[in-house]
Amino acid sequence: MKIFVYGSLKKDKKLHGYLKNSKFLGEAVTCEKYPMVLSKSGWYPYLIEKKGIGKYIKGEVYDVSTKLLKILDRVEESPYYYYRKKVLICLNGKKIKAWVYFVRKFLKFNKKDLIDEF
């Protein structure tokens, strides 16, 4: 299964160790725009499921096992804090579907708060 990561699971980030044995498929961007903002602490990003608003989000795609996906669900506190959904990702010039984590809580944001990369 493919997963698109945009925050603390990326290379050189604090939770990347969970993906160390997974196949890295490449850097990618969302095919649609989404709003992403930083937490107040600045330690992690929130991706908000409002397709068409925001920016094309930059991240990484990995091929993961079902077992690892369940572990990542626990790490991301899915489905309570984040939830997982398949979206179109542009990877190496092709459109693919990959799992991505969206924040569950409704967040207000201003255009100036939006980021495209963490």
Image (tube, grey):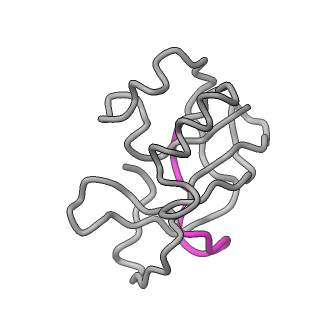
Residue 30 at x, y = what percent? 64, 52
Which picture quadrant has residue 66? top right
Residue 55 at x, y = what percent? 53, 64
Query: Looking at the image, is 112 positioned above or below residue 117?
Result: below
Q: Which residues are magenta?
A: 48-59
User: What residue lies at 20% left-to-right and 62% top-to-bottom?
Assistant: 41
Q: Is residue 114 left or right of residue 92?
A: left
Q: Is residue 56 left or right of residue 15?
A: right
Quadrant in which the N terminus is drawn: top right
Looking at the picture, tell me which residue is in the foreground, 38 or 94. Answer: 38
User: What residue lies at 55% left-to-right and 55% top-to-bottom?
Assistant: 78
User: What residue lies at 51% left-to-right and 47% top-to-bottom?
Assistant: 58
Which picture quadrant has residue 15? top left
User: What residue lies at 55% left-to-right and 33% top-to-bottom?
Assistant: 27
Residue 45 at x, y = what percent? 38, 58
Looking at the picture, tell me which residue is in the foreground, 57 or 104. Answer: 104
Going by the picture, which residue comes out furthest to the left?
A: 41
